[in-house]
Image: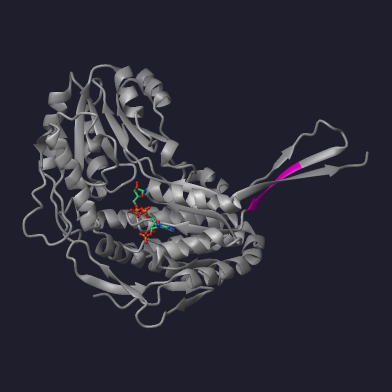
């Protein structure tokens, strides 16, 4: 068991402990062992945190971007120096293989670093006036207090991808991390503390989602809710935010198609399809959920994929040769099983893996599985599975596969494999997705905009676009005597 973390609520620069009984246990999904307990805060703690953020806002927003930058830069350095230990904590609470966890921590630090650089580049505009006696300026202003709600699948990078641009822009923040993975969040807050973040600028409340969410939605000091999680909760937050017309920025679920054309480099495509689907055991919002292969290359491609999938090792993330750790919960395993059962009942056949629930392992493990003879009426072809199950369909024509790929309410990421430049541009333009990867399945990076369209969300994170979410544009019109 880790050291008790009952002081997991951070308000106005102070760690707060709740009275006995107001804690919740945290488990290791690979072993089902209890790791520790964290505080279970509610509306009162959320309101205190919002008040602290509101009081700190004038000081933080008026500080120069250069000064804010130094704190973010220091936080990035501290995170990188401690990446191995932070990775171990992340693996313990979330389950992903340690090498992936350390990679995520480094990715989380890259957002701090990128926005440390952006903090001093919040440019406005000078608009040439059509009236000789007027001058026109557009000034970017931080929007105010930001409420950030994050999921468990990337417990570290989903936090810095929101907090770094918000803080760089001059906003103050109240964070509600996922109840499954609060330990990485606690470490990030400690890093901000050590980096010299003034009290009240970053606050965190762990605990009751409904109660904390209610405080965030109803308190007028909160000007923006930035959320990463399921489409269902995203819709709720958007609906409730309408009462005060709060701005919402939503990074929601996906259902990514991965298309292998007949002119693709099949070895590259098989390696990257494997990485896209099975990284983080398939619990990635942008992971491929459906595979479409041109029928001319289907046999060759699927032979390659089958061999690779059968070589994957499922186990504890702490073991060096593990490729897939556990899923996050029993319900997550049950959803994968339900998608598989539904597909098998409707005529699919297993071509690799099969959910034999991997021997002696105690945790929430699930075998990586590929299924063929898949039809569009199967659950796996229209819902986000969020687990290591890969359905495959073949296709004949480019127009046909584009239509199939777009036939979903989701619009987060899509992938194509082709060596043809005209096809690359033609298909990338026609896919209704916020992100298109071409011979690339790792499009998430600090310097580029990440985000979905349709029911996958409405904001951008990453790049200068990510900082724009936290800035309002104030127009100043000045009459000038001549
Ligand atoms: P979730 O159930 O929607 O939860 C996300 C967060 O919202 C958690 O912290 C959760 O806390 C909180 N929450 C739930 N109800 C709330 C309420 N009424 N008020 C305030 N907060 C509330 O999603 P998840 O299962 O953790 O994450 C998986 C989903 O996230 C997948 O759909 C995935 O595709 C999506 N995702 C999207 C992106 C992207 O960038 N587009 C990235 C990563 C993940 P509780 O757990 O306590 O309810």
Let me know if residue 163 is in the magenta part. no
Residue 253 visible in the current orientation: yes
Residue 123 image offset from top left, x and y in percent: 65, 46
Counting every numbered tag in the picture gives 0
Q: Residue at x 34, y 67 (%)?
A: 183
Which image quarter is the C terminus in?
top right
The answer to which of 114 and 303 lies nearer the viewer is 303
Residue 200 image offset from top left, x and y in percent: 56, 70
> Relative to residue 360, is residue 380 drawn left or right?
right
Residue 114 visible in the current orientation: no
Identify the main secondary structure in magenta.
strand
User: Residue at the left extreme?
Assistant: 359
The answer to which of 183 and 391 lies nearer the viewer is 391
Residue 441 image offset from top left, x and y in percent: 31, 38
Q: Quadrant of residue 189?
A: bottom left
User: Residue at the right extreme?
Assistant: 482
Residue 330 image offset from top left, x and y in percent: 20, 57
Which image quarter is the N terminus in?
bottom left
Let me know if residue 138 is in the magenta part. yes
Q: Quadrant of ligand 1?
A: bottom left
Q: Residue at x 14, y 28 (%)?
A: 373
Q: Measured along the vertical axis of the image, is residue 229 above or below residue 339?
A: below
Q: Measured along the vertical axis of the image, is residue 207 above or below residue 108?
A: below
Q: Quadrant of residue 12?
A: bottom right
User: Residue at the bottom extreme?
Assistant: 20
The magenta stretch spans which residues?
Answer: 137-142
Q: Residue at x 45, y 47 (%)?
A: 235
């Amino acid at each position: 068991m880790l050291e008790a973390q009952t002081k997991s609520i951070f308000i106005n620069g102070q760690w707060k402990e709740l009275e006995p009984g107001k804690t919740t246990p945290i488990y290791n999904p690979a072993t089902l062992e209890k790791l520790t307990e964290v505080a279970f805060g509610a509306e009162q703690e959320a309101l205190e945190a919002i008040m602290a953020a509101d009081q700190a806002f004038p000081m933080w927003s008026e500080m120069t971007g250069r000064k804010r930058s130094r704190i973010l830069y220091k936080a990035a350095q501290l995170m990188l120096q401690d990446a191995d230990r932070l990775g171990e904590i992340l693996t313990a609470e979330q389950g992903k293989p340690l090498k992936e966890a350390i990679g995520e921590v480094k990715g989380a630090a890259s957002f701090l670093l990128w926005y440390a650089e952006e903090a001093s580049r919040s440019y406005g505009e000078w608009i040439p006036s059509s009236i000789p006696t007027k001058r026109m300026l557009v000034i970017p202003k931080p929007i105010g207090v930001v409420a950030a709600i994050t999921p468990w699948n990337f417990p570290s990078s989903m936090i810095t991808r929101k907090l770094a641009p918000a803080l760089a822009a001059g906003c103050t923040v109240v964070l509600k991390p996922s109840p499954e993975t609060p330990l990485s969040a606690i470490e990030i807050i400690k890093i901000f503390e050590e980096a010299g973040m003034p009290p009240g600028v970053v606050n965190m409340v762990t605990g009751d989602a409904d109660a904390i969410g209610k405080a965030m939605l109803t308190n007028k000091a909160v000007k923006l809710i930035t959320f990463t999680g399921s489409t269902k909760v995203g819709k709720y937050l958007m609906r409730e935010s309408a009462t005060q017309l709060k701005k919402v920025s939503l990074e929601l679920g996906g259902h990514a198609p991965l298309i292998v054309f007949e002119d693709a480099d099949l070895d590259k495509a098989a390696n990257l399809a494997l990485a896209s689907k099975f990284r983080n055991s398939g619990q990635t919002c942008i992971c491929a959920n459906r595979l479409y292969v041109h029928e001319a290359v289907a046999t060759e491609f699927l032979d390659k994929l089958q061999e690779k999938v059968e070589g994957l090792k499922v186990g504890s993330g702490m073991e060096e040769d593990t490729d897939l750790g556990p899923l996050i919960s029993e319900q997550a395993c049950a959803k994968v099983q339900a998608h598989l059962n539904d597909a098998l009942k409707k005529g699919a056949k297993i071509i690799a893996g099969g959910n034999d629930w991997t021997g002696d392992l105690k945790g929430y493990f699930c075998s990586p599985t590929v299924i063929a003879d898949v039809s569009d009426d199967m659950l796996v072809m229209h819902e986000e599975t969020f687990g290591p199950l890969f359905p495959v369909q073949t296709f004949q024509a480019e127009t046909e596969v584009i239509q199939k790929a777009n036939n979903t309410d989701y619009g987060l990421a899509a992938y194509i494999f082709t060596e043809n430049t005209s096809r690359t541009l033609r298909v990338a333009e026609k896919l209704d997705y916020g992100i298109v990867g071409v011979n690339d399945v790792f499009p998430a990076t600090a310097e580029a905009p990440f985000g979905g369209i349709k029911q996958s969300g409405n904001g951008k994170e990453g790049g200068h676009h990510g900082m724009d979410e936290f800035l309002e544009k104030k127009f100043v019109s000045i009459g000038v005597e001549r």
